[in-house]
Image (tube, rainbow, N blue to C red):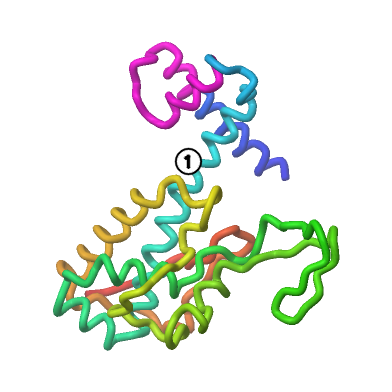
Amino acid sequence: METIQEYLNNLWGYIGDLVAERRREPGIDDLLGALVRARDENQDRLSETELVELAGGLLAAGHETTVTQIPNFVYVLLQNPDQLARLRADPSLVPAAVEELLRYVPLGVGSSFARYAKEDVEVGGVLVRAGEPVLGSLSSANRDGTVFADPDRLDLDREQNPHLGFGHGVHHCVGAQLARMELQVAVATLVTRLPGLRLAVPAAELEWKRGMLVRGLLGMPVAW
């Protein structure tokens, strides 16, 4: 715990320096600058601690998610050689492939953000009583057979794909479009520049992260 707190303090210090920079140079027009203005011009909207921790959360969320999904996507494509071959033969499929991979590949390791029933309600044949918590699983929703045909199959030709890979409503990812662009560039680059890309070790030897909010590989040795 002491090491974790030390690292957190380093992160808060780093973000604090960036906040101070935005105050010295208010002309910097970016998301952090907007948050600083929201704090300074309307101090009832954000406390200084909330400002720093929100910015730190955005930094971590914008980095850890994308760098984890890139190898996740590559791993799944390598396990589905027919789909990978189609992508290599027709890179114009990359945008649709990224959407399908966002649906097919779970990123979160579980469910969070419990919702509490205001009144008794039956959901899926189960009675949820007023005051009881309910956890929704985005991963399960992305495999909902009433929404997606053949939901457990990776299908790069899927036309209707209302996946929840970026959440929904007020919890929709603020960086969704940036993440899409990053994932499309990464997948397109790998399939076009490294047509012989393959795992350098048996899949069974790969290790997965533990104790993280996101699901991903510790490492993925590859050859080409």
Question: Can you say whether 14 is above or below 145 in the image?
Answer: above
Picture coordinates of residue 49, whole percent (x, y): 64, 26
Q: Amino acid at mark 1?
A: Leu
Q: Is 28 placed left or right of 135 in the picture?
A: left
Give x and y (percent) for residue 8: 61, 37
Q: Left of 78 or right of it: where is 53?
A: right
- Which part of the image, by quadrant, shows the C terminus? bottom left
Residue 221 in sight in this render = no
Q: Would residue 111 be found to the left or right of residue 126 on screen?
A: left
- Kindly identify the residue that appears in the image at 61 percent across and 25 percent down: 46
Q: Quadrant of residue 160?
A: bottom left
Above or below, 56 relative to 150? above
Instruction: Mark 1: give few (<14), some (14-19) or many (20+) Cα within 10 Å.
Output: few
Is 66 situated above or below 93?
Answer: above
> Which element carries disc 1, helix, strand or loop?
helix
Residue 118 is drawn in which quadrant?
A: bottom right
Against 43, residue 30 (above or below) is: below
Question: Where does residue 1 sit, x and y in percent of width and height?
Answer: 72, 45
Per the rendered image, the range of residues in magenta is 17-40
Q: Position of residue 189 (x, y in %)?
A: 20, 63
Q: Nearer the viewer, residue 205 or 17?
A: 17
The structure residue drawn at horizontal position 48% and vertical position 17%, both measured from the top left corner, is 20
Q: Of 86 and 133, which appears nearest the observer?
A: 133
Residue 18 visible at all: yes
| Magenta segment main secondary structure | helix
Image quadrant in which you'd find residue 221: bottom left
Observer-nearest of 62 and 224: 62
Mark 1 highlights which residue?
A: 59
**Which residue is painted at 43% across and 24% down in the image?**
33
Left or right: 155 with respect to 185?
right
